[in-house]
Image (cartoon, coloured by chain):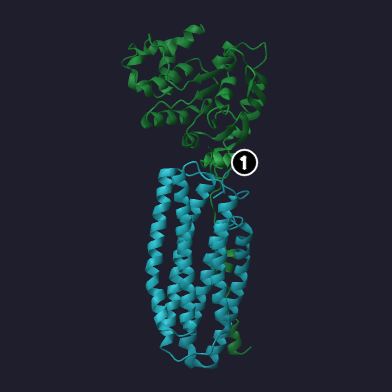
Amino acid sequence: MAPETHTDKVYEAELAQLRDRLLVMGGKVEAAIAGSVRALTERDPSLAEKVIAGDRDVNRTEVEIDDMCRRLLALRQPAASDLRFITTALKIVTDLERMGDLAVNVAERALDLSHSPPSRPFHDLTELADLSAMQLAKALDAFVERDVKKAEEVIADDDRLDALYHRLFNDLLAYMMEDSRVIRRATSTMFAAKQLERFGDHATNVAEMVVYMVRGTDVRHPGSRGGEGGAGPSA
Amino acid sequence: MNAAQEIASVNTTPRRSMDAVETPVRIQSPAPAPVAAREPPKLTVEKLNAWYGKNHALHDVSLTVPPRSVTAAIGPSGCGKSTFLRCLNRMHELIPGARAEGTLLIDGRNLLGRDVDPVTLRRRVGMVFQRPNPFPTMSIRDNVAAGLKLNGIPGNHGEIVERTLRQSALWDEVKDRLDASALSLSGGQQQRLCIARALAVQPEVLLMDEPASALDPIATAKIEDLIHELKERYTIVIVTHNMQQAGRVSDQTAFFYMGDLIEVGPTEKIFTNPSEKRTEDYVTGKFG
């Protein structure tokens, strides 16, 4: 939303409330991914359980935000930046919900692994986890601050995340080949790593929508539109 | 290469990178600009200025209106949008002390020239007003034929009455009572009757000044539906306070503010991603 306020203060408050709910949901997902990775590295089943239980709350918030968006679209007929803000909210809420599910997947792996003997630590896994969580935090910052530059950094940094995942994958493969007894554990770790890589992709989606929200240009799938990015036929 | 290296070299390129090499998703490109946009403009306005006495109401307005399209003029009260509309068929100059200067071309021919007879011009550029204003003492039939009689247009008036009542989507509702008073019609029907009356003299351009603001939602929808049909033959310029209406009926939207044309562009762009901050503030409701 642009800094100026709407003449209709109730509408203004409704938009602010929508933004706040999205941030609350984003915060919950950030906490979930951090918790699930900690449960994994620290072999903490109770923390994993907590993350799994907390997903219900994330899902509830998604439904609530969807309702808010539908209500705003139906009753306020938003235009221009408000329209882009609300349609962005509708899209990123889906990404956030999916990110919550990915955190649950990691937590489930953490539960599974907590019953097995510890495997050797993988430095890249912690780094991958930190980087994916940071990507989400940054994408949400970009959303709040309407900061295209920050959003573009998130989009660019996804390559770093992919490279880390790639390295970890090969590392785990080598580990399994050295000792077939660790295959089950290493596969679980690999699965968790994949979730983190996907988590980063969703953060990128959020960042792409932020660019759309602020500029009105679609940066996804370059080349898939006939002409210049943008909302409509040019004059 | 041993087995371990071989497996380790499996391509693990994550999905997102794979996406980049896939055939890009084909999104249907935005609706192409109407054919009309590639034809020479029906109306060309250049540096139009209008005054009410000393009050300078329109400042250097320039825009073009493609043939067979709908252009909506929006903006807060007193922004000049109605003055702009009234300049287009020289009704503005009927107000004592009012004058307009600039270039106003219809099919490339100047409308503001001294040699142009405003009455002839108004046959080519018809107008529909905010309040339905049928001639109260006349029948439905005579209302539609009024312009034909006034202008001494020969021909089978009965045929023209039927054709224009059909064009204005009123025929089925009035065909059995053409001799009834125009005032026996509902507000929405009266407005469509006024549109029929404007169409009877076969104008090329139809100006509409808030044509639905006095009507209920169903009557409004009928007028809007009619606008969609009429634009296949006529060039329409509509002034509306209702931004959703501008969004629903128009191809291009012009935003006026304090006598200036702030921005004109494809309606979709004006309502999703306007270029000017004042347009943005107006369409999102941040004025006042």
Residue position marked by numbered label 1 in the rendering: B276
A181 sits to left or right of B124: left
| Residue B211, image x, y percentages | 46, 25
**Which color is chain B depicted in?**
green
**Residue in front for this viewpoint, B40 or A28:** A28
Give percent across and percent down for residue A198.
51, 70
Report the amino acid beneath label 1: Glu
The quarter of the image holding the C terminus of chain A is top right
Name the residue located 48 percent from the left edge and 51 percent from the top edge.
A86
Residue at 43% over, 52% down: A69
The number of callouts visible is 1
Q: Which residue is found at the position 47% from the left and 7% from the top? A: B149
Position above or below: B158 against B6: above
Q: Is B204 displayed left or right of B185 in the figure?
A: right
Which residue: 50% across, 90% down? A119
Q: To which quarter of the image does residue B193 belong?
A: top left
Q: Secondary structure at mark 1?
A: loop
B270 in relation to A220, above or below: above
Q: Which color is chain A depicted in? A: cyan
Q: Is residue B14 visible?
A: no
